[in-house]
Amino acid sequence: MNDRIESTRQQKIGRQIQRDISEIFSKEAASLLCGAMVSVTLVRMSPDFELAKIYLSIFPFEKHAEVMASLQENNWLIRKTLGARVRNQLRHVPELAFYIDDSLEYISAIDKLLK
């Protein structure tokens, strides 16, 4: 995504998808998370609403590769579940792209260095 500012509609849809994906992870897709605690920290929508970039914080961080592989493999299932939730708000269910938000890991590393 460019450095352009997201429109109000993009932000609104992004927040809704963030809530829905968080709920899906906690209820219907908990088995896909490999026993890790996963938080959806941010969702950025493309201007045409065809792509949702979903940033995840994973604890413990050591499981991030395993969780990301599971999410990529089961992307269709998460997208299908999301589609059932947003079918009245969006014409098309966006493609889902998962990314690691490692800001907590970075903060933890700096904190260790300072101590």
Image: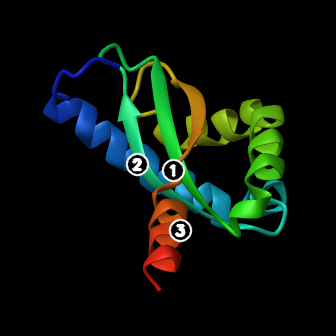
Q: Earlier in the sequence, mark 1 or mark 3?
A: 1
**Image marks 2 and 1: residues in contact by CB distance under 8 Å:** yes
What residue would you read off at disc 3? 109
What residue would you read off at disc 2? 42
Residue at 73% over, 59% down: 28
Residue at 47% over, 30% down: 52
Image position, residue 99 (x, y; %): 57, 39
- Eyeballing the image, is 99 above or below 60? above
- Eyeballing the image, is 2 above or below 82? above
Residue at 65% over, 58% down: 25
Image position, residue 47 (x, y; %): 29, 17
What residue would you read off at disc 1? 101
Amino acid type indicated by mark 2: Leu
Image position, residue 81 (x, y; %): 66, 42
Amino acid type indicated by mark 1: Asp
Image position, residue 68 (x, y; %): 74, 44
Amino acid type indicated by mark 3: Ala
**Is residue 48 something that shows in the picture?**
yes
